[in-house]
Amino acid sequence: MKNSSGVTLIEMLIVVALIGLLAGVTFPAASSGIDSLRLTSATSSVVGLFNEALIRAERRQQVVELTISRTERALWLRSSEPGFQKRVDLPTGVSILSILPEALQGEDGSRRFLLFPGGAVPGLEIVMSNARNARRVVRLDPITGVASVVQVER
């Protein structure tokens, strides 16, 4: 009689069950981590866009229009330089909850802010959220002119 090598059906089922159990346990943690990375990436992109707008207004002496659209989940810059436009689209699962200061009645989901060379920096905040309801606030300080990110506790 020859010795046979291989695995039995029972051994194969146990290995498949263990793999399924590990995948079921680790998926929520991995999914939460990806959502958190998307929110972090989105807030970093918005801070970068704010900084670029401030630099363009001050150093290049150009009027800059900053548009924030809640419905399109996007922000973009336009300046007095012909053809200049920069757009930042938020990743999937990240949304803009509010733009502060509050809009006047009758305004839709988009807001526009103008940055003038030598002018005052508008104080504004964008409250952003991901699919797991983690929130971050991107704040443009009117006194220092610095954009920063603040994590909101639930």
Image (cartoon, helix red, strand yellow):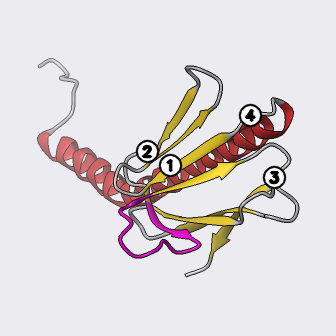
For the residues labelled 3 and 4, the Cα–Cα distance comes to 11 Å
Q: Secondary structure at mark 2?
A: loop
Q: Is residue 36 left or right of residue 70?
A: right
* Depicted 131 relative to depicted 4: above or below: below
Q: Which mark is residue 91?
A: 2
Residue topped by disc 1: 38
Residue where numbered disc 3 is placed:
119
Q: CA distance from mark 1 to mark 4?
A: 32 Å
Spatial distance from mark 1 to mark 3, Cα to Cα?
A: 33 Å
Q: Are marks 1 and 2 in contact (CB under 8 Å)?
A: yes
The residue under the point 75% across, 46% down is 116
Q: Which residue is mark 4?
A: 62
Q: Which residues are magenta?
A: 96-110
Question: Residue shown at 38%/62% (left/top)?
Answer: 131
In the image, residue 123 above or below residue 79: below
State the image coordinates of residue 89 (x, y, percent, origin top left).
45, 41
Chain-order first, disc 3 or disc 4: 4
Q: CA distance from mark 2 to mark 3?
A: 32 Å
Residue 106 x %, y %: 35, 71
Is 102 inside the magenta-drawn segment?
A: yes
Q: In this rendered view, identify the residue nearer to me: 120 or 125.
A: 120
The answer to which quarter of the image holds residue 122 is bottom right
- First reached walking from the N terminus: tag 1 or tag 3: 1
Front residue of 66/5: it is: 66
Label 2 or label 3, whichever lies nearer to me, is 3
Where's residue 32, x and y in %?
Answer: 45, 59
Among numbered discs 2 and 3, the one appearing first in the sequence: 2
Task: Tell me the kind of residue under disc 2.
Answer: Pro
